[in-house]
Image: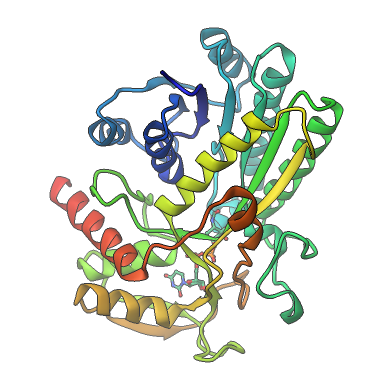
């Protein structure tokens, strides 16, 4: 007996696919909506091999109103939605701001139009980002949900802030009919232990761990560490790296909460999803080498424009309210990323 039907927009993406797997394990039926702008149909095969089920799929560009409408006409029995579908490359957003504003904002607008128009769905979980905090002041580290929001450092970050405001206004106007949770991710890393799904960066990886694994396997000659003259213990930037499977499990808890509390309490809640542990770039690189025994050649390069110096989460609200903890040991996380890199290179 299914616990309900959950729409996952961007469900063929990195975090989306891992969340579909955890929703399945928790007993939900899933509708995956994706246009493969940052993923491939192979991901659906990976999900099926892990879960033993081919969940419903519709190829949908969520930023096209008619396609979103067709999705809800095809699935009028959606009980809740998790909205991942968005462009997410910080650097690319600086080069193509209009693409990011149109895609990321229209996708949410059209989803909310359907959820508030005539859908029976009672909840929506939104994929937000710690980027809304910018560089917290030292007194606000680790960063909690009550920390002041800062002007984002990129159009990507600004779309997340704008979308949180759209969500807030929409659920407030819905008079309790629509419960919502915004999940502010820190830095997702790693891959499912089966090595059947994982991160698929397009072109040269922008994020740290995919660049590390591609250097480890020999695709990249060496890793550039962007700056070691920051005001941190080893001079490199600090982030809160969270295992993608732990992150996915938090989405199941959030869906359960919006379904259970529809019409009760705050219409929109925010949760920081991190481990509560800050790691420097050098600690990640050395930790990866220790966990896998693979050497990763690197050099110290210039700072990267737009990088903040240090941010990590205070996850206590998610721990207490969602009953969720990100506790997978780093060694397992690094090994999962390495196994995934090796697996996809066998195919390519
Ligand atoms: C981490 C650290 C780099 C690559 C971004 C988005 C955030 C989220 C996660 C979507 C930084 C350093 C990196 C490299 C390096 N995305 N680095 N050499 O910038 O913290 O966050 O991705 O939700 O919203 O802003 O992640 O992995 O790019 O960088 O030295 O080749 O690794 O300078 O200090 P970031 P990242």
How many numbered discs, if any? 0
x and y, in percent, of residue 62 in the image: 57, 26
Q: Nearer the viewer, residue 231 or 51?
A: 51
Residue located at (63% from left, 73% from top)? 308
x and y, in percent, of residue 132 in the image: 70, 58
Quadrant where the image shows the N terminus: top left
Residue located at (41% from left, 28% from top)? 27
Residue located at (52% from left, 25% from top)? 7
Q: Nearer the viewer, residue 212 or 126?
A: 126
Residue located at (45% from left, 78% from top)? 281
x and y, in percent, of residue 139 in the image: 76, 80
Q: Nearer the viewer, residue 319 or 201?
A: 319
x and y, in percent, of residue 264 in the image: 77, 32
* 192 to the left or right of 49: right
Vertical placement of 174 versus 283: above or below? above
* 232 to the left or right of 149: left
Q: Is residue 296 visible?
A: no
């Amino acid at each position: 007996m299914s616990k309900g039907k959950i729409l996952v927009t961007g469900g063929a993406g990195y975090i989306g696919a891992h969340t579909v797997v955890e929703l399945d394990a928790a007993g939900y039926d899933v509708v995956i909506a994706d246009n493969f702008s940052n993923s491939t149909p192979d991901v659906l095969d990976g999900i099926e091999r892990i879960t033993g089920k081919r969940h419903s799929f519709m190829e949908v560009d969520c930023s096209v109103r008619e396609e979103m409408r067709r999705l809800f006409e095809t699935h009028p029995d959606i009980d809740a939605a998790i909205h991942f579908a968005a462009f997410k490359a910080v650097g690319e957003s600086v080069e193509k701001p209009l693409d990011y504003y149109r895609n990321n904002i229209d996708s949410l607008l059209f989803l909310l139009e359907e959820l508030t128009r005539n859908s029976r769905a009672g909840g929506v979980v939104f994929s937000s980002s710690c980027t809304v905090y910018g560089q917290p002041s030292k007194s606000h580290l680790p960063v909690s949900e009550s920390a002041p929001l800062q002007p984002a450092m990129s159009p990507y970050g600004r779309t997340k802030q704008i979308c949180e405001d759209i969500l807030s206004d929409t659920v407030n106007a819905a008079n309790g009919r629509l419960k919502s949770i915004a999940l502010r991710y820190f830095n997702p890393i790693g891959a499912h232990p089966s090595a059947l799904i994982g991160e698929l960066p397009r072109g040269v990886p922008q994020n740290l761990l995919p660049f590390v694994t591609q250097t480890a396997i020999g695709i990249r000659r060496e890793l550039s560490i962007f700056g070691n003259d920051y005001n941190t213990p080893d001079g490199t930037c600090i982030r809160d790296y969270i295992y993608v499977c732990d992150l996915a499990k938090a989405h199941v808890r959030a869906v359960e909460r919006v379904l259970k509390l529809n019409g009760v309490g705050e219409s929109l809640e925010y949760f920081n999803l991190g481990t509560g542990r800050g790691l420097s770039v050098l600690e990640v690189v050395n930790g990866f080498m220790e966990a896998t025994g693979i050497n990763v050649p690197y050099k110290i390069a210039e700072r990267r424009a737009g990088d903040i110096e240090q941010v990590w989460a205070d996850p206590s609200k998610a721990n207490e309210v969602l009953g969720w903890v990100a506790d997978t040991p780093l060694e397992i996380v690094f090994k999962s990323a390495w196994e995934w890199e090796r697996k996809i290179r066998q195919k390519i």
